Amino acid sequence: MDRQRALRRRLATQRLMSAPLPSAADVVRLLTCVQSQERDHSFFALSQRSRATTYAAVRAEHDAGAFVRTHILRPTWHYVAPEDLRWILALTSPRVEQLERPYLRKFGYDEQTIGRAFEVVSEALSGRNVLTRKEIGAFLTRAGLLGSGEGLGHLLLLAEQRALICGGPVKGAQHTYGLVDEVVPATPERTRDEALTELAHRFFAGHGPASVKDLSRWASLTVADVRRGLAALDGRLEEVDVDGIPHWFDPSVSARTTRGDAAHLLTTYDEVTLTYPAVGFPFAPGVPEPEEFPWYTAVVVDETRVGTWRRTVGRDRVVVETLLAPGTTPRQRALVDDAVERLGAFHGLPVERVRA
């Protein structure tokens, strides 16, 4: 499979060039986990793939618990469906916790101290209470424990990895936390082999064509674990070579293009760019590399990265700056203009366009 065809299939599989899914939560289930450090940017990424086309619609789903924001897969924020949270954490958290141990030791968190802190957090959140990081920190400070700064962040990340807490509804502009056992329904446990097989299938079905190393990095799994999950799928996936690298996808997942030509304003941590470090979108000549022009976002047209963009949301408008390659055609620029207008509609604001 040549690169362009593989990239087009990814765009269609992830619903950027095919029929949108009914809801933002459906997108999260398709992709299994969606990276979301930049919460509002990642809301836009979900809207681009669904019929929840406005910020308000995506946030309403999030705040109602249709999908959860938490640290999962890697030591970073992701969205995950409630029914997937526990089994994915059970599979992937041990390796993430290994990465966290030096930081926990740095801030004086041995197992006894962690246990005391978790008791405080559990008591503060019990009764379906949801609190911001700062509010939880106040409870810890009153208990004589570290309640602020980087150390608090690592403690809460560990509590998420151990399925004690997870994200709750947005409070003002702040992220909140709730108790997993109170806000996420109980789900059946999986054996490790069952979880490996399920995660491998879900990843390649939602992200394919993708490689073994793509899944290994994405899920903090060893290459041996990925290959074990692949072997258990026993022919349910199709294997192709892309740029000489074996890739897999699920042929039963429709990748029929239905949206026609379009430009895509892809956010910093979009799943269709960040997931594939080896075989990604080629840069058009003259596009600044991220280190030269550090917006880190991508404008993609015709399976090519033709530029970068950023936006500033104000009270009465959204300012969208774009920087496109000098060889971008008038047709491509018109498609980018359409994409910018869709971003404005997502925020419910008129757009002020700035061409950098």
Image: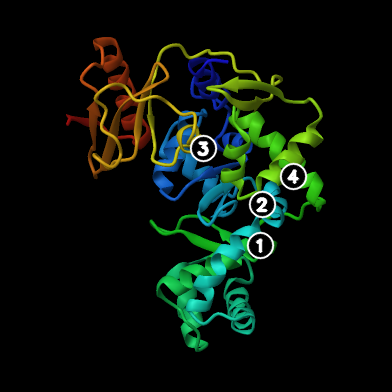
- Assign the C terminus to one quadrant of the image: top left
Assess disc 3: are there few (<14), some (14-19) or many (≥20) residues with their C-alpha within 10 Å of its C-alpha: many
Front residue (pair 107, 89): 107
Specify the amino acid type for callout 2.
Leu
Are circles 2 and 4 on residues that touch, CB within 8 Å?
A: no
Q: Position of residue 262 (x, y in %)?
A: 39, 17
Question: In the rendered structure, which disc, 3 or 1, sits on the residue that comes first in sequence?
Answer: 1
The answer to the question of whether label 1 and label 4 lie on touching residues, with beta carbons closer than 8 A, is no
Lower position in the chain sequence, tag 2 or tag 4: 2
Looking at the picture, how far across and down is residue 34, in whole percent? Answer: 54, 42
Measure how far apart labels 2 and 1 are at the Cα level.
8 Å
Q: What label sits on residue 275 in the rendered view?
A: 3
Kindly report the distance in space between the C-alpha atoms of the residues bearing marks 3 and 1. 25 Å
Q: What residue is disc 4 on? A: 196
Q: Is residue 28 visible?
A: no
Identify the residue under disc 1. 163
Q: Which residue sits at x=53%, y=68%? A: 156
